[in-house]
Amino acid sequence: MQEDIKSKTQEELTEALKDWSLPAFRSKQIFRWLQQGVCSFEEMTNLPKDLRAKLAERFYIATAEIARKQVSRLDGTVKYLFRLHDGQHVECVLMEYHHGMSVCISTQVGCRMGCSFCATGKSGYSRNLTASEMLSEIQTAQHDSGRRISNIVLMGMGEPLDNYENVMRFLHLVSCEEGLHIGMRHISLSTCGLVDQIERLQKENLQITLSISLHAPNDEIRSKTMPINKKWNTEALLKACRSYADATGRRISFEYAMISGMNDSDTCARELASRLEGMLCHVNLIPVNDVTGNHYRKSSPERIGRFVSILESKGITATVRRTLGSDIDASCGQLRRREEEGEPTHAAIREK
């Protein structure tokens, strides 16, 4: 079986090739090519032809091929559906902000967390992504757009902490100086609340931003929408979050999908503020996406404004996520479902 060469660090690559009696600089050359996003060894033009052939026999290069692409007419946000080497599909979103280009990538094909408001889980779980496949999402988006990506959000398809080892390897590869060199402070990782893995992540002492998909102030509401709450309840999750913030000095972002009539009342806002009191954190309110197969509807702008006012009056910093790509299949998992079920895409620009 061929080895995944792009998931290797430069040190691991040097070790893997040590029996080939290569000059010391060769592994550095190969590693740089891989970080640039080449799709074949033939593209490594400064390597001898026989070395390229040997590499192709032993290794494969992970890629993310554009299967579908949607571009928002409203703000230029790009939604990609990538085809992986085994025919599986994952989604990725490229967004422009005042601070630069941000990319939201997937970490799994599908997801097994089963959150009821998420389109990804409705298609089930297939497998984890490798570190190289996560890198390929960024490289393909960067090459296609012609723009340097400066910020990464692990908030696409999948639960990052359910693919812990591959995600940690990806974080170290994407931030290394010889690679894309995107600093940890420009990377956000979102989790639905795997408490044991949050505790494990705390020990890594990374400078990433940890985002928690909270979406409710109590167990009664959260358990209705997020099955993970039955394993680790709200109290256990928030205890782990306080410990993480205290240990790392990094502010936690709580993602809160505003669902009309479910979690957006004044009472919910006050209870949420009480639960978060004294924690190094902020709340990011997100008008819930309309997802086929559920009855959830986003809260009105007035209700969201009232929710923000209550939180701020209690000393909790709150923001409302800017809506990008609203005219395309913006909810994670929807474009993949359309591809696999043979449905037409949303009425937006489709280039591939």
Image (cartoon, grey):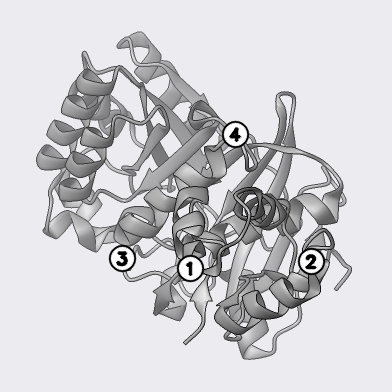
As measured in the structure, the alpha-carbon distance from the residue carrying label 1 to the one carrying label 2 is 43 Å
Which type of secondary structure does the marked residue at label 1 adopt? helix
Front residue of 25/282: it is 25
Is residue 67 something one can see in this rendering?
no
Which residue is under mark 2?
A: 69
Label number found at residue 19: 1
Tell me which label, 1 or 2, sits earlier in the chain: 1
The x, y position of residue 1, in whole percent, is 47, 87
As measured in the structure, the alpha-carbon distance from the residue carrying label 1 to the one carrying label 4 is 26 Å
Hey, what amino acid is under mark 2? Lys
Which residue is under mark 3?
A: 113
User: Residue 66's quadrant in the figure?
Assistant: bottom right
As measured in the structure, the alpha-carbon distance from the residue carrying label 4 to the one carrying label 2 is 30 Å
Give the label, 4 or 3, closer to the camera: 4
Give the label, 1 or 4, closer to the camera: 1
> Given contact means CB atoms under 8 Å apart, are the residues at marks 4 and 2 in contact?
no
Hey, what amino acid is under mark 4? Glu
